[in-house]
Image (spheres, grey):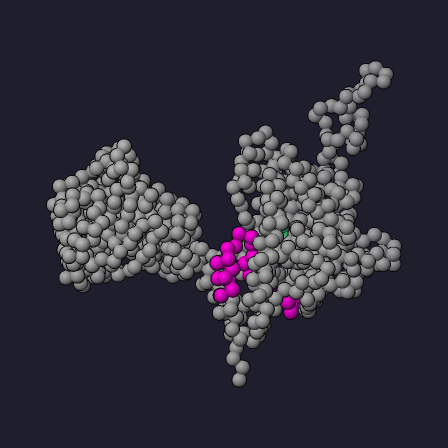
Amino acid sequence: MTMKDIVKKRLLITGVSGLLGNNLAYCLKNTYDILGLYNAHGVEIEGIKTRKIELTSETAVEKIIEEFDPDIIIHCAAISDVDFCEDHQDLAQQVNVSGTRFLVNQALKNGAKFVYISTDLLYGDSPKNPLPEDFPVHPTNYYALTKYQGEREAARVPEALILRTNLFGWNIQNKFSLAEWVIHELSAGKRIQGFQDTYFSSIYTFELARIIDQAIEKDLKGIYNCGSSTFMSKNEFARRIADYFQLNKSCIQAISIDQAHLKAPRRKNLGLDVRKMEAALGRAFPTLEESIEKFYDDYQKGIPGIIKQNNFRKIFPVLDHIPYGRQSIMQEDIQAVVDVLKSNYLTQGPKIPEFENGLRDITTARHCVAVNSATSALHIACLAADIGPGDEVITTPITFVASANCIVYCGGKPVFADIDARTYNISTQEIEKKITERTKAVIPVHFAGQSCDMDAIRDMIRVKERAYGHRIYLIEDACHALGSFYKNTRVGSCAYSDMTTLSFHPVKHITTGEGGAVLTNDKGVWRKLCYLRSHGITSDPEEFVHKDTAFEPAQEKGEVPVKRPWYYEQTYLGFNYRITDMQCALGSSQLKKLDQFRQRRREIVNAYNEAFARTDGLTIPYEADAGDSNFHLYVLLFDFENMELNRTQLMLKLREYGVYSQVHYIPVYTQPFYQKTFATRWGDCPEAEHYYHRCLSLPLYSSMTDDDVGQVITAIRKLARMRSRV
Ligand SMILES: Cc1ncc(COP(=O)(O)O)c(C=O)c1O
């Protein structure tokens, strides 16, 4: 192997600030030593050199080629706006034809391979589609003419490769490819028109880049069509893009290109017959559908963010938004799930007790029953507390409806006690006011992660129990609070309650997709919960009621009776609330990172607090001394009455910055179901309503980057302007 083999070949790419030039540089930068040339739009691309050039100056071209001495030139630069070329024919001629001539002159001088990127617009109009390379050329507009003249220049290099193509992809500049334009307009809620009588076989740039790389390697020469192997109408293309990106297809109006009255004449059948190049390279090209799929796949992998160098969110705020909450999944989480998929048990296997033990260890509760959601957890907790018709159960109005629905599932009546104005948690004094002789349980919710004042609630309940002479259960809804502390105990320890419920929905601290759990220190309660989780069934011989049918009759005196292997008993009316082993494996893997997640959330909260603490009209979350919150939510209160924007306007404006927010919560008793069923009314809990009108949850999740946090802060600061007072 000589030094020349080891040293990378030098590749000169013109038009490196354009879609293909840039994407080629990105794809080929590890294979070649690249110099990218641009004209009007300066670009810097990691791993390659870039320089400005005036292609219309032969001396400038000569100087660069002499200095860089390329082995290969890929000439992508051109003025490609068809209507602009029609209006600016001299300029089009200079850049597209003379520029090519100057490059070709130099390529001939230094012996570089020349690759010329041409267009699908060259062929004459034809009812036939797709068209092969030997179909007569008949440029129908000035752009096509200059590209054809460029081809003639390129063909002066004996080994030149000329590619007639049409492409779409992720552009480095704000200039959009057709696919990007469709996404941009539809995601901004705009209507667009799709030509239903113009057919093309556009190819995704990264696919095209790979084909070009292969063609160079195989030293292909001559003229080739190079596009997707199938074609579709531009209207259909727009619709497929909308499908992939889940955008509103009904905003695409199908029209004829004739109705668009474009300046430059256009051909309608632009399909490319690519079989010649497929045969030359010995590979199939992607269909247009596959090209779109690859374009979408790369979006999902974050390629446009890299190509657009951090401008992606600014350009497509709807596509790349910062949600108010989301999961943080890492490779080890994925592996844990995959391992279960390869194992013997997908459900009712060993991963469930493993996860339950992990939750017990963290919270110090004695028993744990993992189920398929916190809603199920709350339901069986209420059943285990014997809540039934005629019973009243007190909970907070500022919670997700599930905290109250579980009471109704059991036939009980939810009673809403107002919140504390500072913590937004249920107020102990308000609970006290609502307790009657019918009160069977209280369900405090540790809102946003901050524990309720459990000591005070428990003491007050004990007094009431004595007064009414019956037990009042305390069930903590800790769906927001896994990992939080209250007076040096972890929330979930059940040190102050009978049961605690958890949620593993993706916005929570750890996730199992969907999932929940009930923790308790009471063995009897735990046994009941186990029954309720799985149809009310048991296979434990100790628990059997019908011993006579459970065992084989003893043949001899003193013989230990043998349990019938198939036998089980249903003792209660239970449910199928089981969680799977895949979910629990994910949960156990996530649980290992609970404190790391907690810490990152705290860092973000500190940044928000610092940014908003002294801003007029904003109230940051209050933290009571007795607890240490894990901050499931970051709720900021806004003085909307004195702000320029109302909450709807603020939320929609925030979305333009890519920042998604949410309201937690609409007071539960104002929901139509509760008003209808329990005659609750607006005005029932004034503090909750005052809070509701002012709250907004900002994005908060452990995988938020510092840039994300900065973006939220900037957007809020910009938008939370107060009305000027006269
Ligand atoms: C306070 C509270 N309780 C209960 C639930 C229900 O949880 P899941 O979605 O796991 O059923 C939620 C869900 O967001 C919640 O926030």
Q: Nearer the viewer, residue 273 or 424?
A: 424
Q: Is residue 278 visible?
A: no
Total numbered circles: 0
Looking at this view, name the residue that lies furthest to the front: 3
Residue pictured at 71% horizontal, 65% vertical: 420
Residue 430 locus on image (x, y percent): 75, 64
Q: Is residue 614 magenta?
A: no
Q: Is residue 689 magenta?
A: yes
Would you identify the image quadrant in which residue 579 lies?
top right
Horizontal side of 212 relative to 626 (left or right) equals: left
Residue pictured at 60% horizontal, 46% vertical: 593
Would you identify the image quadrant in which residue 291 lies?
top left
Residue pictured at 51% horizontal, 67% vertical: 716
Q: Nearer the viewer, residue 274 or 626?
A: 626
Horizontal side of 203 relative to 55 (left or right) equals: right
Residue 511 locus on image (x, y percent): 59, 46
* Above or below 608: residue 16: above
Quarter of the figure that contains the N terminus: top left
Horizontal side of 262 relative to 614 (left or right) equals: left
The region drawn magenta spans: 688-715
Residue 394 locus on image (x, y percent): 74, 58
Q: Nearer the viewer, residue 572 or 112?
A: 112
Residue 185 locus on image (x, y percent): 37, 59
Residue pictured at 13% horizontal, 49% vertical: 105
Q: Nearer the viewer, residue 349 or 302?
A: 302
Would you identify the image quadrant in which residue 212 lies?
top left
* Above or below 245: residue 636: below
Looking at this view, name the residue that lies furthest to the top: 556
Q: Is residue 664 visible?
A: yes
